[in-house]
Every structure is written in C-alpha cells, then in structure tokens.
Image: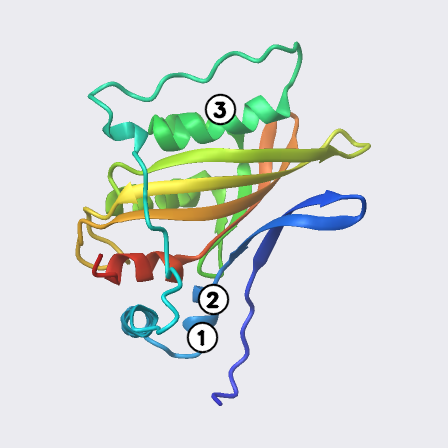
Amino acid sequence: PTGRSITRYGIAHCLVKENRIVEEWIARDEMAMILPLGLDPHALARRRVEIETNRQDNSPVGPLSQGDIIRLRGQEPPPPMPEPETEGFDVDYFVRRAFHEIWNWRLLNKIADYYTPRHWAYVPPNRYLYGLGEYKAHILSLLAAFSDLAVHVDHVCWVQDRDGRYRVAIRWTMQGTHDGPGWYGPPTGKRVRLLGITHQHVENERITREWIVFDQFALLKQLYRSD
C-alpha cells in the first residue's frame, strides 16, 4: 500500500432496452491511477504483456486484426463528409464533421470554427486543457507519435436542454502506426487500435466543454506486444 489518493475518470457508453443495459462500451483513464502510485507505465506495460502472453487459458489479450487505416489508401486525403439531409443545425453532423476535419484532414485551423476560445477539456492522464492553444498541442502530440492516425466516429447520441445547449456523447475508434517520438517512447512501427469516448457541451454551434477518455495504458500494451 502507498497511502496515495487517486482520481480516475471513466465513461460507459450504454445501449438500454426496456430499462436494461444490453450492450456497453467502457473507456477508463488507467494512467491516472498508475502515475500517482509512482509506477513506471512502460515497465508495467511490458510486464503485463508478458503475463498475458503466458496465460494458460488461450484467451485473446488484444485486438487480433487492426484493419485498414483509411489514410494509407493511396495518396488522396479522406473524402469529405456528406451534407446533412435536414435544414438548420444538425448536432450529429456538426460533431462528425468536426472530428473528420480536425483529426483526419489535419485542419487544425478549423478548431476555431468548432470550439469557443474559452473551451476547456479533460484528457488523459487526468489533465485539464484551457483554451484553443493547449487543445491544439494535445492533438499535435498524438499526430507526432502516430503520423497516419485516423479517427472514426462510431456512434453519436445527444439530449437538448431547455436553454438550447446540447449534451453530446460520442464513441470513436482511433487507429494509427507508432512511427514518431513522444510520450509513448521511441517509434516501434506497431499498429494500434483504441476505443475512446467523448462527452461534449455544445452551445450556439460551438463546443464549450469536453471530457475525453481513452486508455493510454492499453495503448502502451499494444506497442510492447511481440505479435
């Protein structure tokens, strides 16, 4: 026991039918627990991979197939988002277009079109970002480590408050090749695939607050796997 206290965020994205949860996708900020305990995440990831690889029950320990990364198909950029079929503000289209243009098209100048200048965000590991500059730096740190990174929005749902604010939940999948420097260590050339969940507040057609949760420790384990 270390006697240290921790705070860890997690988000469950659930499908509910007849007041019962029938499907669930869970994202946790595991690094927010590992770092405050004084553990070395890289050494721990290598050890966990060794243990899971030597398990006797032959159960899978990670994704067996990463699939294609759209950005690798030829030299053309990803295609644009199709226009919405409805008139007026479409929050589903707004969110999907923001992810696509910023992450897949690398149009960081578009951040100002989707986010308020006083925007703040929670990102792993247990950090808060204030303003557009810090948010851009967060995106660039991931793009530096995974130059072909692509993000696919799997599901969007939302509720609208009486004051016109939307509370939005987004489930997404990130894929990329670890071919650059950064917090994740020297480039390994490994392909990764990771689930993430984002909650947003959207007001006056701009994102004002954001909670982004994905498991950096699970990503590290993918980098240290031998297969």
Is the residue marked by circle 3 packed among few (<14), some (14-19), or many (20+) residues within 10 Å? Answer: some
Query: Judging from the image, what secondary structure is the residue with disc 1 in?
Result: loop
Do we see residue 166 in this rendering?
no
Among numbered discs 1 and 3, the one appearing first in the sequence = 1
Residue visible at 30% across and 34% down in the picture: 69
Q: Are marks 2 and 1 in contact (CB under 8 Å)?
A: yes
Residue visible at 46% across and 31% down in the picture: 99
Among numbered discs 3 and 2, the one appearing first in the sequence = 2
Residue visible at 59% across and 33% down in the picture: 156
Within the image, what quadrant is residue 78 found in?
Answer: top left
The amino acid marked with disc number 1 is Pro
State the residue lying farthest toward the front. Answer: 57
Within the image, what quadrant is residue 94 found in?
Answer: top right
Q: Quadrant of the C terminus?
A: bottom left
> Which of the two residues, 42 or 162, is positioned nearer the viewer here?
42
Q: Is residue 15 above or below residue 113?
A: below
- As drawn, the label of residue 36 is 1
Query: Judging from the image, what secondary structure is the residue with disc 3 in?
Result: helix
The colour mode here is rainbow
Residue visible at 52% across and 88% down in the picture: 3
CA distance for labels 3 and 2: 30 Å
Q: Residue 181 vs residue 196: left or right?
A: left
> Measured from the top left, where is residue 38 in percent x and y?
39, 79
- For mark 3, what is the residue? 97
> Measured from the top left, where is residue 194 in percent x and y?
40, 48
Do we see residue 28 in this rendering?
yes
- As drawn, the label of residue 153 is none
- For mark 2, what is the residue? 32
Query: Judging from the image, what secondary structure is the residue with disc 2 in?
Result: helix
The amino acid marked with disc number 2 is Ala
